[in-house]
Every structure is written in C-alpha cells, then in structure tokens.
C-alpha cells in the first residue's frame, strides 16, 4: 500500500484510489506535499485543506483543457478533464455529509467527467434506469468485437464509491476487450442516487437489482441469459444478496467480500478495523437514512448473508485481499463456504505475489481486475485471447 500520509489510512486510501483511477504522480505530489500537517488534524479541518489543494489542481487542469479546446486539440482537452474529474471526486468523497458546497462540488465533478468522456471519445454512455420517482444512473460500456446480443456484467458500488470510480479503475474496459459489456450503476445509497435523489441504501438489494435486470431485458444488444452481477466492498454484501433473490442473474462475483457487515460495525464501535472515509458514523447514517446510532445499528442487523447463500444456483467468484485491513479474510471464507449450491464456486485470495492484497485491491487493481475479468469472460461466454 502506497502511504503518502503515514498516520492517516483514510487519506492514503483516497490517494491510492486516485492513482488507480489514473492520477499522475507529479500532480499527486503537488497536491499532497502541502497537506502533511493537515493530515494530522481532526476530520473537519483536514478535509477542508484536502479539498482546497485537490480542487486547485482540478481548476488548473480545466483551464489547460479550455486552452486545448480553443486550439481544436480536443483529445488532449479530454485527457485533462478526465484527470480533473478524478481529483474533484476524490476531494468530494472526503467531505462530511452536509459540508458547505459539497453538492455543488459533486455536480461540478459530474459535468467535468462528462466533458472528459465526450472529448476523449470513450466507449462510455450515460444511461438512466427508471426507479421509484426518479432513476438509477449508470455508465454503459459496450463489448468490443461482438456481433449480436452481448453478455454483460452489472457492477455496483460499496459504501462510499461511485460509478465513475469503478469505471475509471478499469474493469469495464478490461471486460469490453474480452467481449463482455458493462453497466456500472449508482445504486440507492451511493453516488447520484444518494446525493441528488435522496435514495438511501436498502438491505434487500434485489429490490433495485431486479429493476436493473428488467431494463436490460428490453435492450436488443444484451443477451438476457448472460447477465452477471459484481459488487465491490459493501457490494460484497449487496451482490450475493441480489443474486440469491434474483434468479435471472447468470453469475456473481465480489471484489472484496463483506459477509457480515453488522459484525464489522460492532467491531468499529469497539475501535477495531480501519474506516474508509472521515466522519464515518455520520456517513453511514446518511447512507442508510438513520436518524441516530440506535436506528443505524438496528438497520445494520439485517446486513449479513447467513441463511441466504444456499439460494444461489449459478457460478460465483469470491475474491479478497490477503491483508485487507477493513474486512477480515474470514468473511470471504464464510461466503465461499455457504455457496453450497453454486455449480462453480471459487475463492481467490490475492497475495503479495500478484498484488491487490488490500481492501478490494485498491493498492493494485491491475492483476486482480484481470483475474476477475478473465473469470467473468469464461463464465459468460466472452474471450480471454484475441
């Protein structure tokens, strides 16, 4: 794990995620060098300083991109907007719920991200899936070199990730090259669903996952018999739960298991394990729509997979980092053990040899992501060679 801030796991996690999304090390150094003292400060003061330096770099890149646009250099402009969006998202993710200007920062990030994708000509289309009184927003990436309906992997967030983070880390591009499409969504409790529509997380993830399958079944470019589901981090709970109760999914995979999140919360109350974001307890109450800790812990009691996984009768891959400091490896082993009716189950623990040993492989996603992409392609009828 790259540790720019030796005493601050949450900030190191954010920096490493930014690198995995495509940040440049010189820009990382310019943004982080002034933050050494701020990293030791309480959350409110520290995250304000973090936001300022990372937003300033995004501003500079946007200015340079505008100069490129004026000269007709749109590909270069798109590249700069893409990195600016990474830095804006990284800054926004660390802010407290209700922090002044957070929503404005998030909306600006969405605009800059969209601008970068457009000018770069990326294989990425924004889609909106009807849900309740609003919609679930997603990023659709088409399989490459496929004639007719393609297999697809739906990809869902964890507690605090967004669809753009998952897209930028690279799994959709790796799958596209293997002949598998992707739909990366902001499900309730994450991204746009939470920030712009007030959709809180629900423990019965099949509630929204089934609506996504309904939508995919209307598309002529998707094979309805080859729809898979992947979840990262807390998605390691959402995904198995949804696959268990939505039989139309043809397979499942978790990038970081999360078998018993209720136990993790109890351990965190006892000061065990690492937090993924500052202002952690405020954040989880916001995500789940809980008015206080009593209500939150009551909700958390539902967030586990015991007594559920024997319903899964499709192939399932469980992956976990050997040195995950947020979710102990035992929970990946528990998920695997309970997949008793899966015709093709596998537990893959990423070790120092291949990298990706930290939580959901945020320390090094390349080899872990390739393993997942190959497994998905083999299972859904894609390809693993050109």
Image (tube, helix red, strand yellow):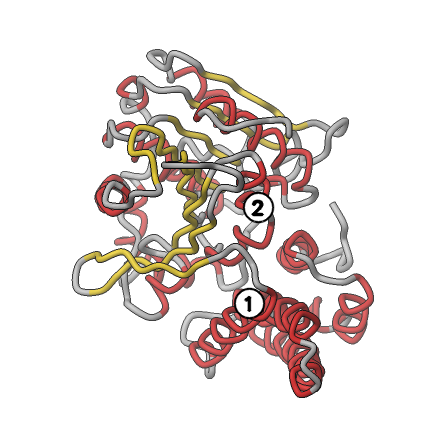
Mark earlier in primary sequence (1, 2): 1
Q: Quadrant of residue 171?
A: top right
Expressed as whole percent of the image width and height from the top left, the position of residue 151 reads 40, 34
Residue 129 drawn at (x, y percent): 27, 56
Q: Is residue 134 above or below residue 13?
A: below
Please tell me which residue lies in front, 269 or 378.
378
Instruction: Between residue 103 and residue 185, name the one nearer to us.
Output: 185
Q: Position of residue 257 (x, y in %)?
A: 48, 32
Q: How far apart are marks 1 and 2 (CA)?
A: 20 Å
Relative height, residue 8 to residue 233 (above, below): below
Q: In this view, does 100 lie to the left or right of 301?
A: right
Q: Which residue is rendered at x = 42% and y = 70% of the image?
A: 97
Q: Quadrant of the N terminus?
A: top right
Residue sitting at x 60%, y 78%: 48
Residue identified by numbered label 1: 89
- Closer to the eye: label 1 or 2: 2
Q: How crowded is mark 1: few (under 14 residues within 10 Å), some or many (20 or more)?
A: many
* Quarter placement of the C terminus: top right
Picture quadrant of residue 385: top right
301 or 200, which is in the foreground?
A: 200
According to the picture, the residue beneath numbered tag 2 turns out to be: 173
């Amino acid at each position: 794990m790259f540790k720019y801030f030796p005493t601050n796991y949450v900030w190191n996690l954010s920096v490493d995620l930014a690198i995995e999304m495509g940040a440049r090390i010189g820009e990382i150094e310019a943004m982080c060098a002034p933050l050494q003292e701020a990293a030791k400060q309480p959350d409110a003061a520290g995250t304000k300083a973090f936001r300022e330096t990372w937003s300033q770099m995004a501003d500079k890149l946007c200015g340079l991109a505008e100069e490129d646009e004026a000269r007709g250099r749109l590909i270069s402009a798109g590249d700069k907007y893409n990195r600016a969006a990474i830095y804006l998202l990284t800054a926004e993710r660390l802010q407290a719920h209700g922090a002044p200007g957070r929503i404005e920062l998030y909306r600006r990030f969405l605009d800059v991200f969209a601008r970068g994708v457009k000018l770069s000509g990326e294989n990425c289309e924004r889609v909106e899936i009807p849900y309740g009184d609003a919609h679930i927003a997603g990023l659709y990436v088409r399989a490459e070199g496929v004639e007719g309906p393609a297999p697809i992997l739906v990809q869902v967030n964890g507690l605090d990730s967004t669809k753009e983070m998952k897209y930028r880390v690279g799994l959709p591009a790796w799958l596209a090259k293997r002949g598998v499409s992707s739909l990366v969504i902001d499900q309730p409790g994450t991204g746009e669903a939470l920030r712009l529509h007030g959709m809180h997380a629900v423990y019965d993830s099949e509630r929204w996952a089934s609506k996504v399958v309904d939508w995919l079944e209307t598309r002529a470019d998707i094979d309805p018999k080859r729809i898979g589901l992947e979840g990262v981090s807390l998605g390691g709970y959402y995904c198995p739960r949804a696959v268990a109760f939505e039989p139309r999914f043809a397979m499942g995979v978790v990038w970081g298991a999360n078998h018993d999140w209720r136990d993790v919360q109890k351990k965190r109350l006892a000061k065990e394990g690492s937090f993924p974001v500052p202002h952690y307890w405020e954040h989880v109450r916001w995500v789940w729509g809980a008015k206080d800790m009593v209500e939150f812990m009551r909700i958390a009691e539902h967030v586990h997979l015991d007594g559920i996984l024997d319903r899964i009768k499709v192939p399932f891959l469980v992956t976990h980092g050997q040195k995950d400091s947020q979710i102990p490896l035992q929970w990946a082993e528990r998920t695997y053990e309970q997949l008793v009716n899966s015709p093709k189950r596998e537990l893959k623990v990423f070790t120092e040899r291949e990298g990706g040993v930290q939580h959901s492989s945020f320390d090094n996603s390349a080899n872990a992501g390739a393993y997942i992409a190959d497994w998905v392609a083999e299972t859904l009828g894609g390809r693993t060679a050109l």
